[in-house]
Amino acid sequence: MKRFLPVFSLVFGALWIAASFVPSKSPSGAVDVVTFGKIPVLVGGRVKPMDTVARNSLLIVQGRERVSRPDVSKPFVSSPTEWLLDVFFQPEKANSYPTFMIDNDELLALLGKSEDDVRINYTSSSKRVLAVFGFLPSRHRRFSFNEIAPFLQKIDSEGEQAEKLESVQRSAYQTAVFNLRNALILYQRLKNSLRPEGANDFSKELAAYKVAIPGAAEAARQREKGENFDKTKLEGITAFAERYDTLANMAYMLTLPAGDGAQWKPIGTSLIEALTTGEIHPIVDAYAALGDAYHNGDVTTFNERAAFLRDWFAKEQATSVKRASYEFFFNHADPFTHSMYLYVLALLLACFSWLAWNRTLNRTAFYLLLLSLAVHTFGLVSRMYLQERPPVTNLYSSAIFIGWGAVIVALILERIFRDGIGAVCAGAIGFITLIIAHHLAGSGDTLEMLQAVLDTNIWLATHVVVITTGYAAMFLAGMLAMIYIIRGLFTRSLKKQTADSLSRMTYGVVCFATLFSFVGTVLGGIWADQSWGRFWGWDPKENGAVLIVLWCAIILHARWGGFIRQRGLMIMAIFGNIVTSFSWFGVNMLGVGLHSYGFMQKAFPWLCAFIASQLALMAMAAAPLERWRSFQSASDKPRSKGRPDPKLVPANLAVESSD
Amino acid sequence: MRKLIDLITSLKLTIACLAAAMVLIFAGTLAQVNLGIWEAQHRYFQSLFVWWPAQGSGFRIPIFPGGHLIGAVLLVNLIAAHVKRFRWSISKLGIHLTHAGLIIMLAGGLFTDLFAIESHMRLSNGDTKNFSEDPRRMELAVIDLSNPEYDQVTAIPEAVLRRGGTIEHNSLPFRIAVRHYYQNSRLEMAKDAGGTRLPIANKGPGAQVVVNPEPRSTGVNDRDVVSAAVEILAPEGSLGTWLVSDALGAPQTFSTGGKTWQLTMRPARYYKPYSVTLQKFTHEKYPGTEIPKNFSSKVTLIDEERSVNRHALIYMNHPLRYRGDTFYQAGFERDDRTTILQVVRNPSFLAPYVACIVVAAGLLVQFGYHLVGFARRRRPEPA
């Protein structure tokens, strides 16, 4: 039985992944959400499926994709796309969903919510107990549009005040009200994307509009010539024009492709243009009929119109459809979440392998890691295909890439040493970086278009990739050092052989990090020289990069000079974690410089906590050697080979490995 | 002597320098939040010492070595150590290459700091210019308009004005006395100031204006508004005091000795032996967004000395290099009708390119050598 565990685990893991890769289909007889979710639209400068718009919008307004309440067992909608459909065509329903995240007490007070209002009263006693221990939320954090609606004016004026300030200067309350205002604007724009909010028989309205156009055109011509004209016809059309002009300005997305270029426009614009051309874009009617059908619960018509739109786009916009469908598939396969679970599972197995069932668990962990890496790679490559870019284009993708790079190097180490250390590193770093990426995705579209200066694949592919590989190596070295210190201090499992191989691994990875960090930094300088006219500008991100290079150089020279041995190397490698995290995140938090592509206030406490934990580890590692449990046995042994004081110099530390 | 040689070639000194550099860079980066990039760079990196207090003429103490000092010591340490310990062997090749590259890089960086000149050229569609302007330094231009063929310009740098006193020059038939000087200031109409301050000039528009001193600006894009009051001392006596300031628009004129002169405070100029004409500036955005996709400036370059007359397109990541100057697309103004080109003259711009290749080769050789050794040692052990 034990023998087959690795293979079984691999097969089960693979089946679990495969299940999520099966193309999704809406059940027959139900609203065809899947077909609708694949329809391409243009938002933020790129073509994406409705499904992505739904997911990103939910992330922006409420920080997650699920629409639910902690005290209601079932979610309100089955998928983000269904929520989007409700927003479009049944806004009165969507208005009652709790989709606006508000955490700030001051802002809650502004909305008239007291502590009692936000407390969750679970009906079942087991849930109540769980809530006390923090396993279930004890207060509401998300509120519906209906709850907020009476305070819109107040939020608008307060948010406008906050908008005038730089993000660094805003107080917590101002940030909260600013974000809420933006979320509300986005929500209102979504509601007015495909038809004016409340136009529940839009098809009929459009038919009336079409009829009115020729008459109004005739009247306008007559007025030009100074003849008698029908005034009511002109006034009627003016009302339409104003309504559609607002629609064109409010629309969050561009829905109508024109020609084969990137010339997309919103529905409102096409309707306004019809005044002069007399023609309305062919799919406006389809969208109108689809919306009316959804509003009335007419599943057959909805599905038929959705299929019509699918076929129309497939014929007219073949490339957009291909990419949008792939993105839909990518969203549903959700590779990064899946590989996150696999990483953490493998991490636990590899840790247990140090306690029992050494060989079996180790191999199981290794197989699961390979599977996880494959899924991770699939996600990374998919993003590259969708964006047509090298892997790293923003902070989010840097987290994905750092994890990926570190996992590969760690797995190579595991392959060479086969002692579970590489597996633990791979699991831990893969899991943590994907968690970080998950939290970075909260700002919306992670495949966003690139600012002009970044619009160069050659530098993104060289400088950015090389430097993030350097980060990955630094974190891996730090992780190896953490294993050395934790195992050495708290367990007796750090044998001399393990300690030596950990030391060699750490040293090798630091060398690797030096090479990549240095080359990456200099390549960055060359890019800067090409685009800004100076090789080096002391920009915070540049400084962060050079700090890593300097730290690597110090580690290597200190070792070559014999100033540090195993323990010193490990302590310094852990400090490398601090330097790297400062360079990766810290400098972005300063909010200055040409590289600050996003200020992240929320991440600041986490960064501080991480740095504090690393400093604590370094301090513990500096503890006298007799406190290291793994070395106690060494010092308990009788004096050997006439060493002056084995208590101070345990045998396994005194040996300086020669590489 | 021996001790000194031991010290400057020691590995400990190297590590001390690297550690000091880390502290300095960390502090200098944090300081940018309050000081702005330029000022922080000046105080921390382009100096021999970091002083406390940072400004003021009184008693100051150096609290930390500055970028130039650390760089110079590191350079000396590096060169000295290699001169002393250099031994030719294949196992040391990587190390020698790496450090040779670093020497090139450090020396190049120091050289760039000392000799590179960065300036801006602002061009609206159709404009032609044969000079670029310094974004940081001002000059007082005194222009002799008497010759119809050309204008004779005498430029007095900001640093000379700051020193104060009386300025004389062969090309000027009068002396200029600096009465007041403000590194940063805000101008205000005297009638709005409420009589609390009085104008410091008595001629030209400056006679109706009061100058409020301001602390130096710290933002990346903020500039100091330099103002000064200068008295023109002609042989026949004082002609009056003029206010010259970056914030005053048009040049002011006065006459003496039968000639008309212009007086203007303006960004310091670097004249070029060629001219650049902006044909068209283009600013592309991604459809449906305000995210910039590309900026580009189509220019014509005319150099009569070398009979050059050609078009060039300057856009993001694609600069134009000509006669030692490099033009970059840096920005735009006025609803996309004006382009701002960054003009850099850096005689050592090749150093980092060469250094990068040499160091990367060195590191590859070194670590590759280790890796081969490492793999060899692993093999005999049972897996």
Image (cartoon, grey):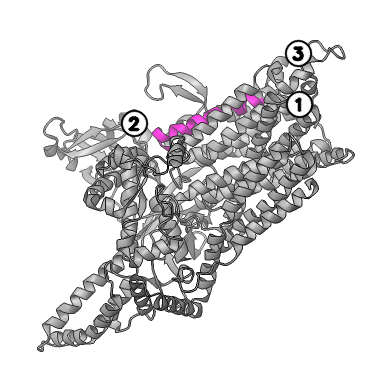
Tell me the quarter of the picture where residue B279 sits. Answer: bottom left
The answer to which image quadrant residue A475 occupies is top right
Which of the two marks, 1 or 3, is nearer to us in this view?
3
Query: For the residues marked 1 and 3, what is the alpha-carbon distance in whole angstroms?
Result: 39 Å
- Which disc, if any, is residue A647? 3
Q: Which residues are magenta?
A: B14-37
Q: Residue at x 50, y 35 (%)?
A: A607
Q: Quadrant of the C terminus of chain A?
A: top right
**Mark 2 crowdedness (10 Å alpha carbons): few <14, some 14-19, many ≥20:** some
Please give the count of numbered marks on the rendered protein.
3
Q: Which residue is mark 1?
A: B84
Callout 2: chain: B
What residue does disc 2 label? B162
Instruction: Tell me how far mark 2 sits from mark 1, CA to CA.
Output: 48 Å
Which secondary structure lies at badge 1? helix
Answer few, some or many: residues within 10 Å of disc 3's Cα (few below 14, many 20 plus, some between 14 and 19). Answer: some
